[in-house]
Image (tube, helix red, strand yellow):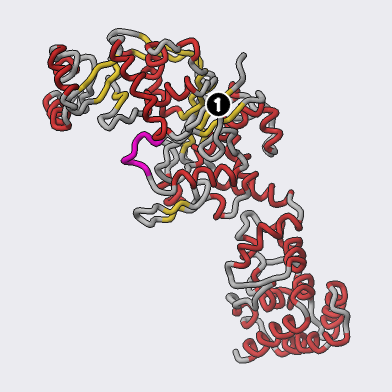
């Protein structure tokens, strides 16, 4: 077998959907498993859909994910250029070859001609007529016009496109690495445009030419591209390259959480979770779409999530490092059916990865989320706090939510929990405990011992005052042990928070 070469060929039209990242991942894993090469090619043939900044965004996403290509626009390689708009001159010769061999034709139809065709041939049974083997005989193309008129139109630089001539009554078939034997009836396929009036190829021609010239051995893409497969198969055949055609695998869709339909950006917005790898801001509308990175996911967790959206290794194992995925990945174990996206399960994965990281490793990851709140902190202090609250955190922003009271005096949102049962006995307890602070070592154990001594002195049970103390220090009914919190925030801050609530509670 020749050296494995796979490619991801995105269009720079916006944010990178998690389905796109999964396609990258499966390509990457397959290439690495077989000691092959992973190519990233930018398919920007449709300049009308080009979005400024989208190409750089794609590379940034893959860098964050740790899935960087071996050859690309940024890196270069033996088959450069890797941006299709820079390969424009390559495609015409192949489109012309197809015309000369009778497998394609010039079409001079104007936009008005095409609209008139769709209007005249529209029926209830055929609401969207296509330029196919039935209708091409009624259109203005090199199949219906006299040769001398075609030559004159070309000489006059009359705008035209080149269309593939799809054969009638033919079954086109291939073996998909995931779906097995697949076949198509060409009577249901229209004559796709191969070369546009601006000289740019469409996806159909460009993908075949580039895969051939770049020696791609395996092509993995989403199942939504299956309807295009017969056009591509015929192009490989008509160009004389059929024996060099890559093996194909059409990946299953990532579905909405309820399993009904493909997961979209709107679903994420509606249900409150990201569907893009990283934040994407549309340069035209200014609309910001949140990504997994900014939501607080670790890239290792994100990759693990995506790997299992359509694949498993045949065991019950769920947590895989990238190296393990490379070792175990097999395209034959990718499922045919769509995979439902479960955000709660995604968060579970992230929690698992957070727990596996050392406190030192987490400092650098957590610090930016703390800094968002205008807090400047010492790394050693943050490391200790991470150790206290890590188990309670699922996403990186949770470290602020679960530990903000370590950095700032909290707002007391549940004061009524204290005031509803406040009395002179509790007031005397807290005042007595605060007064003991100067005579004890400021450690967890010393604080707890002093606390217990005050309980005995004031004839109280722990349950009478432990929750009020937590609310005094934290602002709510959560957080790690209260004595660990007091030890961390220090004597003066602990005293200040308790005295403040004693005053407020006594006013009720």
Q: Is residue 358 magenta?
A: no
Closest to the observer: 508 or 106? Answer: 106
Residue 187 at least partly seen = no
Q: Which residues are magenta?
A: 44-50
What residue do we see at 57% from left, 26% from top?
Answer: 334
Residue 186 at least partly seen = yes
Judged left or right of residue 198, residue 503 is: right
List x then y, in percent, for residue 106.
23, 19
Judged left or right of residue 152, residue 81 is: right
What residue do we see at 70% from left, 38% from top?
Answer: 321
As drawn, 74 above or below 39: below
What residue do we see at 35% from left, 53% from top?
Answer: 284
List x then y, in percent, for residue 456.
85, 81
Judged left or right of residue 101, residue 341 is: right
Q: Quadrant of the N terminus?
A: top right
Q: Quadrant of the C terminus?
A: bottom right
Closest to the observer: 138 or 359? Answer: 138
List x then y, in percent, for residue 229.
40, 20
List x then y, in percent, for residue 243.
49, 10
Tag 1: Cα neighbours inside 10 Å, few (<14), some, or many (≥20)?
A: many
As drawn, 364 above or below 331: below
Circle 1 sits in a helix, a strand or a loop, which is it?
strand
Name the residue furthest front.
155
As drawn, 150 above or below 65: above
Q: Which residue is mark 1?
A: 6
How many badges with numbers are in the image?
1
Closest to the observer: 187 or 85? Answer: 85
């Amino acid at each position: 077998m020749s050296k494995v070469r796979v490619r991801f060929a995105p269009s720079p039209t916006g944010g990178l959907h998690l389905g796109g990242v999964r396609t990258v991942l499966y390509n990457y894993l397959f290439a690495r498993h077989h000691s092959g090469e992973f190519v990233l090619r930018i398919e920007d043939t449709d300049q009308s859909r080009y979005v400024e900044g989208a190409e750089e965004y794609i590379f940034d996403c893959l860098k964050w994910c740790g899935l960087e290509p071996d050859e690309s626009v940024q890196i270069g390689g033996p088959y450069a250029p890797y941006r299709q708009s820079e390969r424009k001159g390559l495609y015409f010769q192949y489109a012309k070859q197809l015309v000369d061999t009778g497998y394609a034709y010039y079409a001079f139809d104007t936009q008005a001609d095409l609209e008139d065709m769709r209007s005249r041939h529209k029926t209830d049974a055929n609401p969207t007529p296509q330029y196919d083997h039935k209708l091409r005989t009624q259109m203005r193309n090199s199949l219906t016009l006299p040769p001398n008129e075609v030559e004159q139109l070309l000489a006059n630089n009359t705008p035209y496109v080149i269309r593939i001539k799809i054969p009638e009554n033919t079954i086109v078939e291939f073996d998909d690495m995931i779906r097995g034997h697949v076949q198509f009836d060409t009577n249901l396929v229209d004559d796709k445009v191969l070369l546009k009036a601006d000289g740019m190829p469409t996806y159909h021609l460009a993908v075949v030419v580039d895969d051939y010239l770049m020696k791609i051995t395996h092509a993995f893409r989403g199942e939504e591209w299956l309807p295009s497969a017969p056009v591509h198969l015929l192009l490989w055949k008509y160009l004389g390259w059929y024996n060099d055609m890559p093996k194909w695998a059409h990946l299953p869709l990532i579905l909405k959480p309820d399993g009904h339909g493909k997961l979209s950006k709107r679903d994420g917005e509606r249900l409150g979770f990201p569907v893009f790898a990283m934040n994407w801001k549309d340069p035209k509308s200014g609309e910001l779409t949140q990504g997994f990175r900014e939501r607080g996911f670790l890239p290792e967790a994100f990759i693990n999530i995506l790997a299992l959206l359509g694949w498993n290794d045949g065991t019950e194992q769920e947590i895989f490092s990238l190296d393990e995925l490379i070792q175990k990945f097999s395209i034959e174990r990718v499922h045919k059916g769509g995979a439902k996206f479960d955000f709660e399960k995604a968060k579970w994965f992230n929690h698992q990865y957070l727990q596996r990281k050392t406190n030192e490793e987490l400092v650098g990851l957590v610090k930016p989320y703390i800094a968002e709140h205008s807090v400047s902190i010492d790394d050693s202090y943050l490391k200790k706090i991470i150790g206290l609250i890590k188990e309670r955190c699922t996403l990186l922003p949770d470290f602020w939510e679960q530990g903000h009271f370590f950095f700032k005096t909290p707002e007391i949102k549940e004061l009524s929990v204290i005031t509803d049962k406040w009395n002179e006995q509790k007031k005397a307890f807290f005042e007595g405990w605060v007064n003991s602070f100067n005579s004890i070592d400021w450690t967890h154990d010393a604080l707890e011992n002093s606390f217990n001594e005050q309980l005995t002195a004031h004839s109280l049970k722990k349950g009478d005052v432990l929750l009020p103390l937590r609310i005094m220090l934290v602002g709510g009914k959560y957080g790690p042990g209260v004595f660990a919190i007091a030890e961390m925030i220090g004597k003066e801050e602990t005293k200040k928070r308790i005295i403040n609530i004693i005053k407020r509670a006594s006013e009720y």
